[in-house]
Amino acid sequence: MILDLIKDKNFTKNPYLYTLILLLMAKLVLFSSEIFTLGYINVVLNILPSSGYIINLVELSSFIFITLLVIFLARKILKISWNTLGFRKTGSLKEFLKGWGFGAIVLISCVAFMIIVGVVRIDKVTFDSKLILEFIPLLMVWSIQGNAEEVLTRGFLFSGVARKTNILIGIAVSAIFFTVMHLENDGISVIPLIDLFVFGIFAALVMIKTKNIWLVSGFHAAWNCFQGNVFAFPVSGTNVGNAFINVTTQGPSWLTGGKFGVEGSIISLIVQIVLIILLCYDLFVKQKMNVLDKFDIETYTDEVE
């Protein structure tokens, strides 16, 4: 049925049917990527030693299947342009590195505030050659992981829905889907769920602001990397190995983030809300964009496919 709709293009005429198809495709991407990932992990771990560090690298690098599946569906099936997905060529590396810097600064700011209010204590700081050498591949695989989630939720879902309906619906759909993606994570509770949804709003606004996927992908990657492998926090409920700075949390989970990590803390929530307010002021007050208008990145770029 879905394939029939795609073939005759009827689903593109109804924006809400189009949104439903995109959601089903996004779910299909997640399901299919899990199958590819299982095979990939089995093959690689039969070749490489099965240490915690190697397993972490393999699991994070497996997110590339999400990116590849999205690109296949978007380009070959739906005929969506690279620009619409956010893959703008001009300044892509610069934007990605800016995102890394921005994400690192925001994460460090959240942790610093936790230390100031006394709910996080630094126990040990380690900078040795082994950790540094291990950190370099982690930069790459966190980039793969962060980019994959952004390509799926913002490049594919947000841009696709906002292009057919409006900015508000695009933000809501992509933020809800991003939140649902993490429902089975360890440490999930009310504040982490709200935090995930708010991050979904923030990330979509960043994509609107920058007109590309690169900066928000870099932000996402840096946030996770610094959270787990610079500071030893769980990343969305998952422990990800050694870190340069080992910390101990002491206090209520709504302040420390508990088992979920920094993004389970109300401190992270407040910081993101402030960033959202600043972005909304810039986009919808200064630039006079309307949340009820459609949003198509193609109208903001002169790059040729």
Image (cartoon, rainbow, N blue to C red):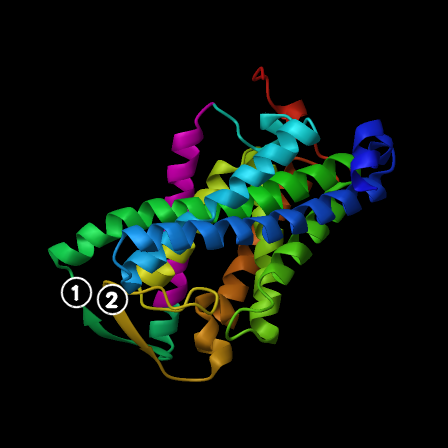
Q: Earlier in the sequence, mark 2 or mark 1?
A: 1
Q: Position of residue 112 (x, y in %)?
A: 34, 66
Q: Which mark is residue 234?
A: none
User: Quarter of the image containing the N terminus?
Assistant: top right
User: Looking at the picture, does residue 297 appear above or below residue 250?
Assistant: above
Confirm whether the magenta stretch covers residue 100.
Answer: yes
Query: What residue is drawn where x is 69% and y is 45%?
Result: 25
> Which kind of residue does numbered mark 2 sit on?
Ile
184 and 224: which is toward the camera: 184
80 and 76: which is toward the camera: 76
* Left/right of residue 107 with respect to residue 199 in the rendered view: left
* Left/right of residue 234 with respect to residue 77 in the rendered view: left
Specify whether residue 49 is in view.
yes
Tell me if label 2 and label 1 are in contact, CB under 8 Å.
yes
Query: What residue is drawn where x is 67% and y is 23%?
Result: 299
* Left/right of residue 83 with respect to residue 139 in the rendered view: right
Query: What residue is drawn where x is 67% and y is 43%?
Result: 158
CA distance for labels 2 and 1: 6 Å
Q: Residues within 10 Å of mark 2 (few under 14, many from 20)?
A: some
- State the SS at label 1: loop
Dividing the picture into quadrants, the one containing residue 78 is top right
Dividing the picture into quadrants, the one containing residue 70 is top right
Q: Which mark is residue 126?
A: 1
Q: Position of residue 90 (x, y in %)?
A: 47, 23
User: Looking at the picture, does residue 183 appear above or below residue 92?
Assistant: below
> Which kind of residue does numbered mark 1 sit on?
Thr
Query: What residue is drawn where x is 32% and y is 54%?
Result: 46
Which region of the structure is painted magenta?
Answer: 90-112
Residue positioned most to the left: 129
Q: Which mark is residue 245?
A: 2
